[in-house]
Amino acid sequence: MESELDTPLCDDSFHLPADTYYELLQIRDQLMMYTRFVAPVTHQEDDAHLELTRNMLADCFAQLASRLTQALESTDSESND
């Protein structure tokens, strides 16, 4: 049985350069790291407060946005060649 993730969103496809694909994998891994960082370890931590400043969170999002922009720009420039 096919899962939703295995079903293409559209019939069109494109070639993703290896460097861009690798960068996207790293961004995914970084998001997973953030998830593990904030996830509770024990049941007692479910409602615990997490001390995280707005600047720290903003820096995380800014870094991810910058990396995604670079990956998308490299994909766009490769498709125009």
Image: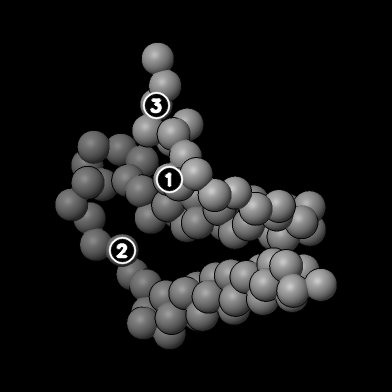
Residue flagged by tag 1: what amino acid is it? Answer: Leu
Q: Are marks 3 and 2 in contact (CB under 8 Å)?
A: no
Callout 3 amino acid? Ser
Q: Secondary structure at mark 1?
A: loop
Badges 2 and 1: C-beta atoms under 8 Å apart?
no
Residue 78: name its quadrant. bottom right
Q: Quadrant of residue 44?
A: top left
Residue to which mark 3 is pinned = 3
Q: Residue at x 45, y 47 (%)?
A: 10
Q: Which residue is mark 2?
A: 50
Q: Is residue 57 left or right of residue 71?
A: left
Residue under numbered circle 1: 9
Q: Residues within 10 Å of mark 1 (few under 14, many from 20)?
A: few
Q: Please identify the quadrant where the C terminus is shown.
A: bottom right
Q: How many marks?
A: 3
Q: Residue at x 78, y 52 (%)?
A: 18
Where is residue 58 shown, x and y percent of the image?
43, 81
Which residue occupies 67% across, 72% down?
76
Residue extending farthest to the top is 1
Where in the figure is residue 25, as x and y percent of width and height? Answer: 64, 51
